[in-house]
Image: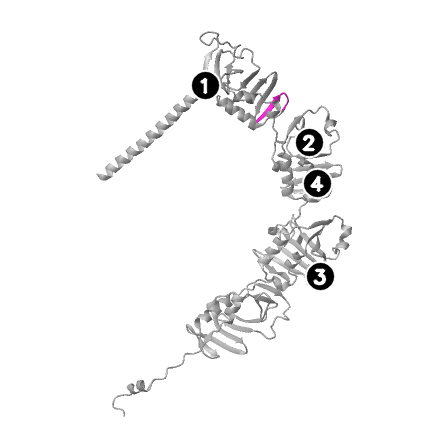
Amino acid sequence: MKQKNTLILLMLAVGLFVFIRFYQSRKLSTNEAADRSKRVFNIDTGTIDGISITNNGEKIDLRKQGPEWEMEVPLKDRADSMAVNQLLTSIDTLDVDSSFDADGKGAGKATLSDLGLETSSVSMKLIGPDAPPEIFFGKDAALDGKMYVRLDGSKKVYLVSTDLKNQLQKRADDFRDHKLLNMEARQVNKFDVKTPAGEIEMVKEGGAWSLDKPLKTRGDGQKISDIIAQIINAHIDTFESDADLSAYGLSEPRGTITLETGSAGEPAVLQLGQPLEKDKTRIYAKLSVRQSVYTMPAGMEVLLNLKPNDVRDKHLLQLNLDTVDRIHIESAGKPEIVVARKQEDWTLKNSGDAAANTALVKKLVSDLQNQQVTAFVSDETSSLPEYGLDNPVLKVGFSAYASENTAESKAGDNRILTIAFGRVEGDVVYARVEGEPYVVSVPKGILDSIPTDAGQWRDLAIFNFNPAEIKSIEIVRDDLTTAIEKAGAGWKLVKGSGAVNTVNVQSLQATLATLRAVRWTGSATEGLGFGKPSLVISFTTAVGQSGKLILGSENTQSMWNAQVAGMPGAFVVNKPDYDILRTDITEAAKPTATPSPADAASATPAGVN
């Protein structure tokens, strides 16, 4: 019974909610209808296709072309969509304060002539389905901000705000789009700047910008796009007559800027003329796809001083690591290092395919990709000896590898690019991508990020096994040897004194089994303290593995030099790991308590004297 009552109450609540929503919607519709009844025009402005304005003999015709508005009269040009939308809003919200018939009868006895509505100097005609008759604007009323209007064919007069008439009395130029171009920067695929000093031509292919003139090289896509956006969004201050181009310095312009989109439309050519005589902050300009001469901010003149190096890509190189299978490092006087891809990891080809430091490979590519040139030094191959690039001190090559001939490539290494480094001068080193003539300078610190010793490319994992597999450990420290081995579930001391500290042994096991180097220092091991080690740890595992870790001297970064017996090269261990490796695995045995005489007497068996 209670469940039935609950259901009934729920249905009543839902019904009440639906009724309230319906009532409110009807009420809103009623209010909207009341508002509409006060309007001069009861139309949907979205259906308006055109607006014809007559203002003291000047005629302005605006027509909608798709989503955009165009000016047809007094000249063809793009219309200012904001100005048109503002006008449409004023049309849609033109409210009637009061109305009366201007037939010369009644108390007012006003006629259309009296109200300036017989022959009006300002009128507007809307074009579109169900468009109303032409509206005429007459004299201002006695009330401030109010005036008289009427529709064509009617003597009914409306008292309305003067806002709409004020908009209609704007000059034709006020309805023209003051944004220079109606396109987006991403659409442009060719950008050309010509000045008496020369020509710079930039082309976009596959989303990447390059220079075609006066030299062929990579372009700075971000900078080129920013310049194009600056041109497209440039603001026109005023529209001038274009009858005499020489008066504006445009018969022989100081420079021309051409933008092409690759579509069917013609290129947009902007000509830049002379500054205004009385205002040097503005210059004259003319655009091929629009009428008139314009005045624009003089800041556009900066494009006349554009140099090829201003828009060149300042990255040392561009490379996609996903396309690379092998990296070749050739350092003068040292064996070549070849790092090869092995699925998601990397190996050292000329070191028995030993595991390489994958993180170091990615860092190398990232460092080279992100390195910015400090200067473009030369564009001539004849200058290579001058910069030490005829015999580089270091070369880094990137190649794709094919195991057999394909339609795209031959079997073997197919070089993608090689970057060469030449002479160091001050804080920079000269560099060049082989196959290109361009010499650049980059900070010499980039050389430090490219290891030239094969040992420095080794994987940072020194040991990698389950700590529980270790069955024996021997530690030599300060000429003292301590050895332990597994005994059932615990450990027993084989050499040394004291009791085994199980907690410390477990820490040592975990650190040793998963030991990682901070970095490899290379093949050389002299001067690292291995002649007199600070610590030597030998171990064996249940699966037949063994290892011997030798720790030498402390370096200047408070870390410790280390090597593994039988493994070439040396590496660095961080201090936290070193501290655990050096921790005592034994502790002094607790002495056995000696019983007191009283305790001994009490322990004597009864009957014994």
Could one spot residue 134 in this view of the protein? no
**Which range of residues does the magenta coloring cover?**
68-76
What residue is disc 1 on?
A: 97
The correct choice, above or below, for 609 with respect to 265 in the image is below
**Disc 3 versus disc 2: nearer the observer:** 2
Q: Earlier in the sequence, mark 4 or mark 1?
A: 1
Secondary structure state at the residue bearing disc 4: loop
Do residues under tags 2 and 1 come within 8 Å of each other at their CB atoms? no
Amino acid type of disc 2?
Asp
Residue lying at 63% horizontally and 34% vertically, measured from the top left: 232
Secondary structure state at the residue bearing disc 1: loop
For label 4, the crowd category at 10 Å Cα-Cα, with few meaning under 14, some 14 to 19 and many 20 or more, is: some
Do residues under tags 2 and 4 come within 8 Å of each other at their CB atoms? no
Amino acid type of disc 1?
Asp
Q: Earlier in the sequence, mark 3 or mark 1?
A: 1
Residue 207: percent from left, percent from top: 62, 41
